Amino acid sequence: MDMSSKSASTARIDRELAHLKILSRLLGHEMHSQSGQRIVLSRDSLEEMKTSIDLFIESVHGGRVQAQSTITSVETTPVASRIN
């Protein structure tokens, strides 16, 4: 694996993890702003969390489908064989 493919792979992983980072920061903000055993979230906050999770799932699933299509598109060239 050369350096350009490693950096491309790292960039792809960073993009996919960005959705989870946003979700983590939102949860951290809510925990910090509300002191107590219970945390109250608005419907909008929950919708944003759900959207972040859905985007993460789609990006990971999309990468898997893309990888599978790359693998299935590999063509083998026929090789002459000799039967004794």
Image (cartoon, helix red, strand yellow):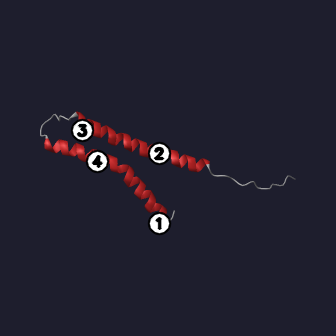
Q: Is residue 18 left or right of residue 4?
A: left
Coordinates of residue 52 in the picture (x, y in percent): 33, 42
Q: Which mark is residue 62?
A: 2
Q: Amino acid at mark 2?
A: Gly
Q: Nearer the viewer, residue 84 or 48?
A: 48
User: Distance from label 1 to label 2 (Cα)?
Assistant: 23 Å
Q: Amino acid at mark 4?
A: Ile
Q: Mark 4: give few (<14), some (14-19) or many (20+) Cα within 10 Å.
A: some
Q: Residue at x 21, y 45 (%)?
A: 28
Q: Residue at x 67, y 52 (%)?
A: 75
In this figure, which residue is indicated by the disc labeled 3?
A: 45
Earlier sequence position, callout 2 versus callout 4: 4
Earlier sequence position, callout 3 versus callout 4: 4
Coordinates of residue 42 in the picture (x, y in percent): 20, 35
Earlier sequence position, callout 1 versus callout 2: 1
Q: Which mark is residue 34?
A: none
- As drawn, 83 above or below 41: below
Question: Are discs 3 and 1 less than 8 Å apart at CB?
Answer: no
Coordinates of residue 80 in the picture (x, y in percent): 80, 56
Earlier sequence position, callout 1 versus callout 4: 1
User: Distance from label 3 to label 4 (Cα)?
Assistant: 12 Å
SS at badge 4? helix
In this figure, which residue is indicated by the disc labeled 1?
A: 3
Q: Nearer the viewer, residue 2 or 53?
A: 53
SS at badge 1? helix
User: Distance from label 3 to label 1 (Cα)?
Assistant: 39 Å
Q: Residue at x 34, y 50 (%)?
A: 18
Earlier sequence position, callout 2 versus callout 3: 3
Q: Which mark is residue 22?
A: 4
